[in-house]
Image (cartoon, grey):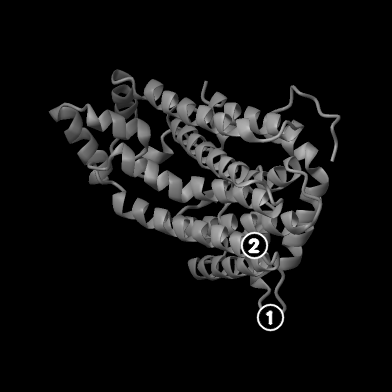
Amino acid sequence: MSLDIDPSVKPHERLAAYLEDDMVAVNLLIRERMASKHAPRIPEVTAHLVEAGGKRLRPMLTLAAARMLGYDGDNHLKLAATVEFIHTATLLHDDVVDESEQRRGRPTANLLWDNKSSVLVGDYLFARSFQLMTDTGSLDVLRILSNAAATIAEGEVLQLTAAANLSTTEDIYIQVVRGKTAALFAAACEVGGVISAAPETQITALSTYGDALGIAFQIADDLLDYGGDTGATGKNIGDDFRERKLTLPVIKAIARADEDERAFWKRTIEKGDQQDGDLDQALALIAKHGTMVETREDALFWSAKAKDAMAVLPEHPVRDMLSDLADYVVARIS
């Protein structure tokens, strides 16, 4: 761990630099546990996704929580690897469900191999994650992470049933986000507190921080789809629109739509009949009703909630980085 970190660097990069030694150990553990004697396709598929880059934010949250609370064992490494395996498994399954062809600027595993391989390797990683979490010998850790895995699956199914349904409300959207994104953020933070034997108030604060950070993170991602920098995000503007995803800016616009506008959303989102110029029309309706601004305010609300939760945690360089991270996830959409 290094304290000689340039404060002008982005918060997640500062956190990565501070936790560098731990992350090296976690990456070694991931490579060790994704090996398979009998099925070489497992490490091939897993390595394609795990080694494709990404911020590794979720495992860093586990390591950060443990370090902030003075933990000096090695179970935080196992739990960080567990969190990354759960996340990677969900990505493999998501790409099959969404019929995706790109992830982090590279072809998806289901495109390079096939859907069967992606689903089965995802299942293998889930199994590996449970092996790792039981290695800690903590029933509380097992409860938290197994609950998170169930919540993630539930959120994905809810998203499937809510997809392209114009009656989807903001409450349902938040429920989906809590499942698909925030549940793992919250669990990643919480288990770091549990293995550190922190007071219950601090463990609860970590869970609250992770939940709120995850929601702010996903809202910001959804906003970037309608107004982000393609070079910076790796996504094309309007991907969510083309995939008929009901994200918060659109849900708010539909709630205020007049008869003609609602007919437009019904045709393009519910029926999937999209024509040239429809994305521009969608952007115009979103601008007309000011839903980008309102959605950003929602992201700021959750970011502030994450920062407020940090108040009961001990003063520490990591606490400051986590607080800055909550600001940064929303600053991306300034």
Q: Is residue 151 visible?
A: yes
Residue 27, labelled with which disc?
none
Q: Where residue 214 sits: x, y (%)? A: 52, 40
Which of the marked residues, 2 or 1, is nearer the chain's N terminus? 1
Q: Residue at x 17, y 35 (%)?
A: 263
Residue 274 horizontal side relative to residue 20, left or right: left
Identity of the residue furthest to the left in this view: 259
Q: Is residue 33 above or below residue 9?
A: below
Residue 136 horizontal side relative to residue 174, left or right: right
Q: Residue at x 63, y 52 (%)?
A: 191
What distance separates the C-alpha of mark 2 from that of mark 1? 15 Å
Q: Is residue 318 above or below residue 134?
A: above
Amino acid type indicated by mark 2 = Thr
Residue 157 horizontal side relative to residue 79, left or right: left
Secondary structure at numbered mark 1:
loop
Q: Where residue 187 sits: x, y (%)? A: 57, 51
Q: Where residue 88 sits: x, y (%)? A: 59, 57
Amino acid type indicated by mark 1 = His
Q: Where residue 287 sits: x, y (%)? A: 33, 20
Q: Residue at x 56, y 44 (%)?
A: 204
Secondary structure at numbered mark 2:
helix
> According to the image, label 2 marks what residue?
46
Q: How many marks?
A: 2
Residue 38, labelled with which disc?
1
Label 2 with label 1: CB-CB less than 8 Å: no
Q: Is residue 276 visible?
A: no
Q: Residue at x 56, y 46 (%)?
A: 185
The residue carrying pointer 1 sits among few (fewer than 14), some (14 to 19) or many (20 or more) residues within 10 Å by Cα, namely few
* Viewer-side residue, 330 vs 271: 330
* Viewer-side residue, 238 vs 122: 122
* Viewer-side residue, 172 vs 165: 172
